[in-house]
Image (cartoon, grey):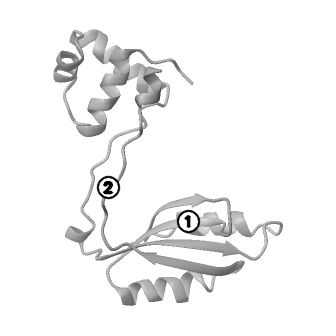
Amino acid sequence: MSRLDEFEIRMLEILQGEGRKPVSELAEEIGLSATPCARRFEALREKGIIKGFQAQISRRAVGLMVEVFIQVRLVSHSDGSPERFIAAVERMDEVSSCWTMTGDYDFLLHVMVRSVDDLNDFVMHRLMRFPGVRDVHTQLVLQNIKGPGRTPLAHLRR
């Protein structure tokens, strides 16, 4: 892990909240001139600390009214099922995120669809019919209290 100084930590905190802030404004806020700020910004990108920038899109505004977390358990881990499942998930537009997990289930999927009927179709006709899937557990999101989240940075100051 790279050691970051206070200027870089502050830069990351600001950019997480406002990723399109011009370098000149960013420099002013963190107390550097524009050129050193731009160099530090590029160094953070080159190190992979800043992975990129993207628009945050309201799922509801684009018609995705149902948001769920789906836990998936596979039958076996020794027959190539995990690799095939991961490859399939990477092609599923409805799946916005996927994690491998410890515990009773192997994967956790974050899924967004238009309706409960679309959710039923996704679970019953795609996930449950995928070779190697033993069972799924679906949890409907009622309200998003906090997120998508920021990366915690306070530990960098210790």
Picture quadrant of residue 26: top left
Rendered image: mark on residue 108: 1
| Mark 2 nearby-residue class (10 Å; few <14, some 14–19, many ≥20) | few
Picture quadrant of residue 157: top left
Picture quadrant of residue 44: top left
- Whether residue 136 sits left or right of residue 23 in the image: it is right
- Whether residue 28 sits left or right of residue 150 in the image: it is left
Secondary element under disc 2, as helix, strand or loop, is loop
Q: Residue beneath label 2, please?
A: 146
**Image marks 1 and 2: residues in contact by CB distance under 8 Å:** no
| Residue at 30% from the left image edge and 10% from the top image edge | 36
Q: Position of residue 2 (x, y in %)?
A: 53, 21
Secondary element under disc 1, as helix, strand or loop, is strand
| Residue at 42% from the left image edge and 20% from the top image edge | 43
Label 1 to label 2: alpha-carbon separation:
18 Å
Q: Position of residue 53 (x, y in %)?
A: 33, 41
Tag 2: residue type? Lys
| Residue at 19% from the left image edge and 20% from the top image edge | 29
Tag 1: residue type? Leu
